[in-house]
Image (cartoon, coloured by chain):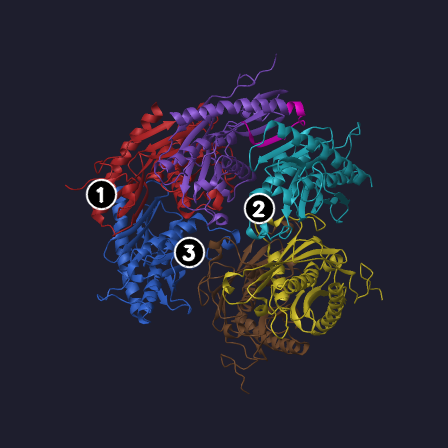
Chain colours: A red, B blue, C purple, D cyan, E brown, F yellow
Amino acid sequence: MSFSRPSGRAADQLRAVSIQRGFTRHAEGSVLVSFGDTRVLCTASVENKVPPFLRGKGEGWVTAEYGMLPRATHTRSDREAARGRQGGRTLEIQRLIGRSLRACVDRALLGERTITLDCDVLQADGGTRTAAITGAFVALADAVQGLIDRRELKLPASGRTPLVGAVSAISVGIYKGVPVLDLDYAEDSACDTDMNVVMNDGGGFIELQGTAEGHAFRRDELDALLALAERGCAELFAAQRAALAS
Amino acid sequence: MSFSRPSGRAADQLRAVSIQRGFTRHAEGSVLVSFGDTRVLCTASVENKVPPFLRGKGEGWVTAEYGMLPRATHTRSDREAARGRQGGRTLEIQRLIGRSLRACVDRALLGERTITLDCDVLQADGGTRTAAITGAFVALADAVQGLIDRRELKLPASGRTPLVGAVSAISVGIYKGVPVLDLDYAEDSACDTDMNVVMNDGGGFIELQGTAEGHAFRRDELDALLALAERGCAELFAAQRAALAS
Amino acid sequence: MSFSRPSGRAADQLRAVSIQRGFTRHAEGSVLVSFGDTRVLCTASVENKVPPFLRGKGEGWVTAEYGMLPRATHTRSDREAARGRQGGRTLEIQRLIGRSLRACVDRALLGERTITLDCDVLQADGGTRTAAITGAFVALADAVQGLIDRRELKLPASGRTPLVGAVSAISVGIYKGVPVLDLDYAEDSACDTDMNVVMNDGGGFIELQGTAEGHAFRRDELDALLALAERGCAELFAAQRAALAS
Amino acid sequence: MSFSRPSGRAADQLRAVSIQRGFTRHAEGSVLVSFGDTRVLCTASVENKVPPFLRGKGEGWVTAEYGMLPRATHTRSDREAARGRQGGRTLEIQRLIGRSLRACVDRALLGERTITLDCDVLQADGGTRTAAITGAFVALADAVQGLIDRRELKLPASGRTPLVGAVSAISVGIYKGVPVLDLDYAEDSACDTDMNVVMNDGGGFIELQGTAEGHAFRRDELDALLALAERGCAELFAAQRAALAS
Amino acid sequence: MSFSRPSGRAADQLRAVSIQRGFTRHAEGSVLVSFGDTRVLCTASVENKVPPFLRGKGEGWVTAEYGMLPRATHTRSDREAARGRQGGRTLEIQRLIGRSLRACVDRALLGERTITLDCDVLQADGGTRTAAITGAFVALADAVQGLIDRRELKLPASGRTPLVGAVSAISVGIYKGVPVLDLDYAEDSACDTDMNVVMNDGGGFIELQGTAEGHAFRRDELDALLALAERGCAELFAAQRAALAS
Amino acid sequence: MSFSRPSGRAADQLRAVSIQRGFTRHAEGSVLVSFGDTRVLCTASVENKVPPFLRGKGEGWVTAEYGMLPRATHTRSDREAARGRQGGRTLEIQRLIGRSLRACVDRALLGERTITLDCDVLQADGGTRTAAITGAFVALADAVQGLIDRRELKLPASGRTPLVGAVSAISVGIYKGVPVLDLDYAEDSACDTDMNVVMNDGGGFIELQGTAEGHAFRRDELDALLALAERGCAELFAAQRAALAS
């Protein structure tokens, strides 16, 4: 009854989602994704080379890098390039983005190419990693389609493309005792449990990262959170499809 | 029928667990933990200082560092100190260990002290992070008890200690289509889905990190994995209690 | 006669200039500046501290950092945070931006505060450093005005503010033998001489950085370039004023 | 009238210049250059390899590195090797030296070789970068002549050598309102405007780097400074020729 | 008379020495060596590659790396991997270990292989480098024997193996005016002169590193120290032989 | 009979030694020392601060840094500042220089000051570390005398100064089977055994670092080498005294 989210949203309501393709012009895919006030620029870059451990195997690679502009946040953070190293949080997030996107790519069909997804946060208000994954998928789809359109990628007789599904991600958490969808910064800093869920459009889970910041969470709470995440990802897949169709 | 694990274990069987206290003598807590052939030295070091963001707040801090000896693995890995930076995997693991252990400490009762848990892998055969968390808890318990025994820590009238529960961790995964407990290296490198579960002894989940390496996992698979993890952690809590009682 | 610029512009014509204030919401000043296809996000962050060499002197500091998103350019560049160091070009540019902006600030009136100007290139098409300086001035002006509006800054009886003028910057060069204003990437990579000129709105020169990439330049060529730069900066001051008035 | 320079020099007077060839014996060119109390050791090293971006193109490369001994200055500075990174000033200067020297070399005639100019300041009293460029030219000339003398470099039928002119550099500035030539440390730390000018012996400008440290400079001041620089460089070319003839 | 060592040992008495082979299972040689409370894990790793300067020469290489677990010592030391660089002491020790072990290997007979000796201190009580050298020899011997046993190494007709002798090391010093053998931490921190001696089993000296921490040492003191070291190394060779025979 | 050194020197003959004081003017002590073609610039810098571990103890500190100009050697070496780290050899040498010089200083009499000895090799021909120690002592003596002359250092009633003796260093080695003094580069790269000996002018040994590069050395060889070193250091003490008296 007395429960209300700082933003006034319903417990199972996403923030306004926007996926703008072609935000910059040099990259093979370039998407500005917004989850409310969180805005992430995701670019996909195609290069005709692979990391050393894949050379000569005929397979491709998909990887990600993540960054946050120093003043994307309430108070200015140090610039990682100036400090001389990427922090643990950055490395953790970019590893997560890379694994998530690789889950929807058939690397054998990609050929000896690397697609790098650069996810740079222009403005942060919670959920930057889930927005990044959701937007990076669209940039990746554009980059793969470009390879096909320019006939750089030879498709097999079956016509199968290297993209074997869609991927999106959303956060869920327990805020003031209530499971809620898509935490913003105000909720994120106050919530007890926080979970990032990455799914594919076949309803399967790709990544699950839950952390109890306050009290540990019970099985029934987990079940409620997973149900919310499934609903949120379904909406995000629709938003991705709409963006790609436009 | 035809299903069998490389080690011959049952699907819900842990490897032999051993928790040896007092393995080295300088640290306030020093534990050699073994999950089968995986062996991790966990030491707890108490220092009378806290990181800058906590100074003057009367609270303590618990943190962790993780390392792998270069030849803990089948083939030699580079020494991170020689390369000049800790890798993303290392940072991710030590952040996980730190968060997990903080979940069982009342930092206000700890006072302005830092307890650092150094988890160094002497021999790796899968599951180093879960062994590290399970062993580090015992080292932490010894360090806290030492503070009490030496009367460096003044307990409140209630007699409550800074330790508010126990923490253990185990991996689960889907190997050849079957959910199994406590993956060893042979299983880990071949399995489709891999999840690390950190629990407290009240049955709550502290951390959940699941990754689909091959196909995405369904809700029913997830349920089976969580049930296995609950069973594994229960056995680990018993092993911790036995070690602390000896 | 046969001379024409790749963009079809006249020799003394700037690219379309746009200065959008309030592009992100956390920073005390946040400006997206475009010189044609070059787009730079300039934020001004105010912090109540100064570098060690100024502590206790009652003076403020103004400094700048510069970065380029990896795919701001035609081909992807390495992320400086991942490489672990800022390159010489980056350091050179951020030092230039910092010196240029300090030239329009009375640091004694600023008090013991630091204003950091982060200039991050979202899309590059030549002239990123001149766009950065021109945009950063507007972000700085917004940050200073905010301090005054929030009465954090006490103005002297004279009513003088810490901003003692305006600063803008433009590039000029000799392209196919003809002096031209505001080089884009196509011209920049082909031109013989390239000069960046920073001016104040009193008509004085703050920085002059000319480089002969092909043949050395003569005094008469230099005179022609400086005349173009004066004209370009005059237009930029008008654009800044219009943006600040809106 | 009342104007006087700390050193007693006339406004258009260089400090005593000395160019000593063969200062050390291993390098292909080794010059100790002095502009008054500023002393820089410039060595030219020839290696039969080029950077990756030039491999297989049949062209050579000329590059520079700059360093300052920790106690070249009034108070000891940190050793950059110990700090683990070269500072922005160092990188800026070595990039300037490299560009300046490349301006007098026909890299196609040099063949697939790199000549590295190491400029190490033994004692600093202002003007280290201009002394470095002036001295490095002589070291470069010795290295190129050595290649010709040892017949390692095949000259074309025209007899043209890779050296297409001479390069020298001098600083000018406005000290107490008066334009002066070749600033020493006492003037440099007190002057309003400071400009480094690199010229070739055909009277062309190669680099121009002017900075208004106090008030911005006007066009007529700039003209006076450039006239001084032309005169100073003319004297330096004579000193270089005398040194090379000895 | 009144002289006594903190440990109660005689002046020429080693601490209890233990050499345990096969301590971990992945490495080609794995030895836990103890000199009293000093415990070092020494592993030998064989790789079929050599450093760039040896490629194609048909020779092998032997090198060492040294590390100390953060809480091997009385108070916790920083983790070198986290600090981002190995300290001078670490580099000095690992260079010493590498040189010492190379002295007993015929690198031409080893073929194009590298054997890396990782010496990681689990617990420190003085003399870690001498324990490391002594234990690393046994790990090296196991690795070489393994190559022979697996017929990866073809021995010459003479039957000579790449191992041309044994190497051991011990510290000696002047404690309270008396020359003593095998300093422990209590002695090491209080002694005037400290010398590490590396010998081969032919009675020759391989390395000698003596440092006067308090007063300089005289020739007669040096002679006494060398005699003690010869005796200590003789005992260590016996311990190595016993370990290798078991 | 047939034995001869590449330089034609007798086995017990030093190279020409030169010690030039006041080589640069800013440092409190500045010495260019030459051992034949090896030339090292040694400066002593006095600063009124001590490292953290000595703060408030009333004692001073003496430390050293060592560097080699990139083209001090036959072929150009990488600049350590550009590589971003000092190599193991550099760290080892500067630790040796620092320990050696501290051996002749009463740090309690020095007061809370640090004297830093920067030893930069301008030209290398073997023996750079021994030349550096020998020259650094003279720079140190000048710096200490300057403190006394300027009355910054209050001497005790006894009149004792912080300098408690002199320190010099020389290398010895076995070249073609013959013990020789003061190895130059040609000998150093070909010799079997190489030892650096640091002595004080009371005939005591401060540091002894011997390495068998080829065969291990016997006790009688060691005795011969030490006798040569004693003779060499005696000559160096005379050269230091002569330089300080001039």
Residue D119: which disc?
none
Query: What residue do we see at 58% from left, 72% from top?
Result: E171
Say which residue label 1 marks.
Answer: A179
Q: Secondary structure at mark 1?
A: strand
Residue stretch rendered in magenta on the structure: C203-221
Subunit ID for the residue under disc 2 = D
Looking at the rendered structure, the kind of residue marked 1 is: Pro
Q: Is residue D103 above or below residue F179?
A: above
Q: Of tags 2 and 3, which is closer to the observer?
A: 2
Residue in front for this viewpoint, A240 or B187: A240
Give the percent coordinates (x, y) of residue C62. Answer: 47, 40
The answer to which image quadrant residue B108 occupies is bottom left
Looking at the rendered structure, the kind of residue marked 3 is: Tyr
Q: Residues within 10 Å of mark 1 (few under 14, many from 20)?
A: many
The answer to which image quadrant residue B234 occupies is bottom left
Subunit ID for the residue under disc 1 = A
Q: Give the residue furthest to the right.
A: F1
Separation (CA) of disc 2 from disc 1: 51 Å
- Give the side of residue B187 with respect to residue E48, left or right: left
Q: Is residue D110 visible?
A: no
- Give the side of residue A137 with respect to residue C2, left or right: left
Say which residue label 2 marks.
Answer: D86
Residue B66: which disc?
3
Separation (CA) of disc 3 from disc 1: 33 Å
Separation (CA) of disc 2 from disc 3: 31 Å
Give the percent coordinates (x, y) of residue B57. Answer: 32, 57
Mark 2 vs mark 3: tell me if same chain.
Answer: no
Q: Of tags 3 and 1, which is closer to the observer?
A: 1
Mark 2 vs mark 1: tell me if same chain.
Answer: no
